Structures are given as structure tokens and as C-alpha cells.
Amino acid sequence: MLVPLLMRERPGEKMLPWTKGTASESAAHMQLHSWSQIFRSLFKVFFLPSSFLMGVAIFCIEIGIGLMDAILPVFTIQEVGWTDARFSHIFSITNIVAGILGMVAGGALSDLFGKKRMMTFYLAASIALVIIMAFIKNSWGDPYVITGFIGIYYTLYVFLTIAIFATGMQLCWNRISATQFTLYMAIANMGRAVGAWHLGPLKENLPWEYVILSYAIFALAMLLIIQFLRMRRHQLRVEVLEKNHLDTHAPALPLP
């Protein structure tokens, strides 16, 4: 909370509402002044092909993530025989380690090899991981196997999330980037809720190995969808949107 509170985004702006400063010209230039402008602009950019496909891809993978988040505590306690405390301990450690690795290397890998390529790798690796997990049922009693699965899965999840966020930001139109990115996050949360809901019906009708394997369906869906993302073409289309917006809303020049 203190970082955004005590830092200026642009030189000369107010740090706090009662301190000295003025809005920067660049910020004022990008400001939209009505709900109608915001929603019209959001509609235009979100339904560009790459932007829309990314929204669908995010929804698909978040269904899988929500499903896996619901699976792991139930699976490890009911099927493997762990205690609540043991799962919480392993879960917290793996998430901290994965988070640190993500901060150190996640963004750098996306910058080095490309966000789309890294998302493809993370999704393919996670699909392979759950397939292996589903077919080694006889090893589920080994705590190192389950711990390793949880650790690798959450590491891939963190790295994939970093690449997804970076891609979503790149797809945003600067004029409404906050609204557009918020929409992506809302879609992600909806997907997680849908995924968690699926655990009950799946467990009633399928054994655990197929329930776990269900994650691969949603990861594969995202893997296929993101192959159709065209980032450069999307950026060119956003530039056209910006030009059209400026042409439509440019202030009238004073008469000589």
C-alpha cells in the first residue's frame, strides 16, 4: 500500500490529495470523461481478434486452475491420507518458493524468449505433468511424489501467470488499460469459480486420476487458442483506434 501511496507516477503530480502538484499533460491527454466513452472504447479494443482470444484463453486456463486448486486439498487428505496441517505446510512452502522463482526469473524468461513462446512451454509442461501424475497411481502413497507434483505444478502456475499478465498488459489500449486489464482479471476469477464448481460433478462420476487429468483439457484449450494471437497486428489495430479517437475528439483549433 505504501509503494503507490508514496510514489509519483509522473513528475510534478500530487503525491497526496492535499499536497502541491498538477496533473501531467500526458495523463490529461489520455483521460476519458464519460462512462459511454469508456465502454465504447472497451468494446472496440476487447473485440479485436487477439484481445478477444486472450480473454477466452484466460477463461479456459483459469477453469483448470480453479479445478486444481479445489482438487489438491481434497485429494491429498481424502485419497493420500495427509492431514490438513501437512497440506497447508507443503502448500505454503511451495507457493513461497514458486513466488520467489517467479520474481527472479519469470519476467526475464518472457522477455528473453517471448511471452507467447513461454506460455506455450508452461502449458505443455503442465499438461505433461498431470498426465504423468494420472498414470502413476501406484506411486501416490509416496509423499515425495505428491510433494514434487505440487511443487512443480505451482511453479509452472506462477510462471504461466506472469506471462499471462504481461500478455494481457501488452494487449491493452493505453487509453483504457485499467478497465481492459480489470476485465481480463474478472474473466480469470469467473473461470476459477467455474473450475472449483466442477470438482463435485467430476468426482461423483470419475476416479481421481481422471479428475486430475481434466486439468489438461483446459490447459490444452489455452495452448491451442494462444497460437492464434498476433501481437504485432493487434498493436497496429490499437494504433488505428487511437488515431480514430483523436480525430473524433480532438479539440477545435481557435480561429486566427
Image: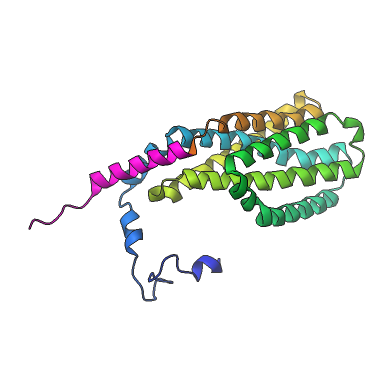
Q: Nearer the viewer, residue 197 or 173?
A: 173
Asked if residue 134 lies left or right of residue 243, the reply is: right
Dominant secondary structure (helix, strand or loop) of the stretch shown in magenta: helix
Answer with the quarter of the image where residue 93 lies.
bottom right
Q: Give the residue furthest to the top.
A: 205
Q: Nearer the viewer, residue 102 or 6?
A: 102
Region rendered in magenta: 232-256
At a point 15% along the width and 54% down the height, the residue shown is 253
User: What colour scheme does the image use?
Assistant: rainbow
Q: Give the residue furthest to the front.
A: 112
Q: Is residue 156 visible from the viewing direction of this image? A: yes
Asked if residue 28 lies left or right of residue 80, the reply is: left
At a point 79% along the width and 39% down the height, the residue shown is 74
Q: Is residue 196 visible from the viewing direction of this image? A: no
List x then y, in percent, for residue 169. 50, 47
Q: Give the residue furthest to the left.
A: 256
Q: Quadrant of the N terminus?
A: bottom right
Asked if residue 185 lies left or right of residue 241, the reply is: right
Decide: is 87 above or below 63.
Answer: below
Q: Nearer the viewer, residue 108 or 61?
A: 108
Does 58 lie within the magenta span?
no
At a point 68% along the width and 28% down the height, the residue shown is 217
